[in-house]
Image (cartoon, grey):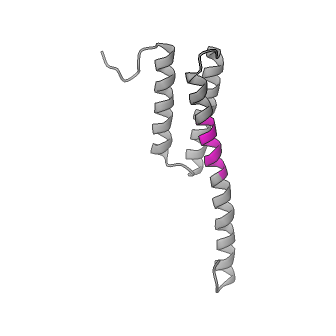
Amino acid sequence: MAKRTASAKKQARASVRRTMRNRAVRSEVKTKIVKARRTLTEAPVAESERYAVALDAIRALDRAAAKGILHANNAARRKARLTRQLVKLAGLPAAGAGS
């Protein structure tokens, strides 16, 4: 912790609080992504549940990016990979496939 001024000590305490909160959000995002990938790869799961779990993970990524916890490009990349996996599983034509 900081040694000298009261403001430095306060800033250090605030930094610890932010770090813990950001770590919790990142952990939640990772958990939702893993859950979505697991749901996408398991066979006996309803199609609507697959979409719901994937959308939940995408929402979590969007929230983390909006708060600045994840970089916007990092969130976009993860969303694209998850969406690509969902589209591949559904048998739909890929968006960036071209004609």
- Outermost residue, bottom direction? 4
Identify the image quadrant of the C terminus. top left
41 inside magenta stretch:
no
Residue at 49% of width from left, 49% of height from top?
Answer: 71
Q: Main secondary structure of the magenta part?
A: helix
Residue at 64% of width from left, 66% of height from top?
Answer: 15
Residue at 68% of width from left, 67% of height from top?
Answer: 14
Residue 43 in percent (x, y) is at 59, 16
Task: Please say if 28 is above or below 96.
Answer: below
Residue at 64% of width from left, 31% of height from top?
Answer: 56
Residue 24 in percent (x, y) is at 67, 50
Residue 50 in percent (x, y) is at 61, 21
- Outermost residue, left direction? 99
Identify the image quadrant of the N terminus. bottom right
Residue 41 appears left or right of 77:
right
Of residues 10 and 40, the one drawn nearer to the viewer in this rendering:
40
Instruction: Tell me how many marks there are.
Output: 0
Residue 81 in percent (x, y) is at 46, 32
Question: From which residue to which does the magenta span run?
Answer: 24-33
The quarter of the displayed image where residue 21 is located: bottom right
Of residues 67 and 31, the one drawn nearer to the viewer in this rendering:
31
28 inside magenta stretch:
yes
Of residues 2 and 34, the one drawn nearer to the viewer in this rendering:
34
Task: Please say if 67 is above or below 6.
Answer: above
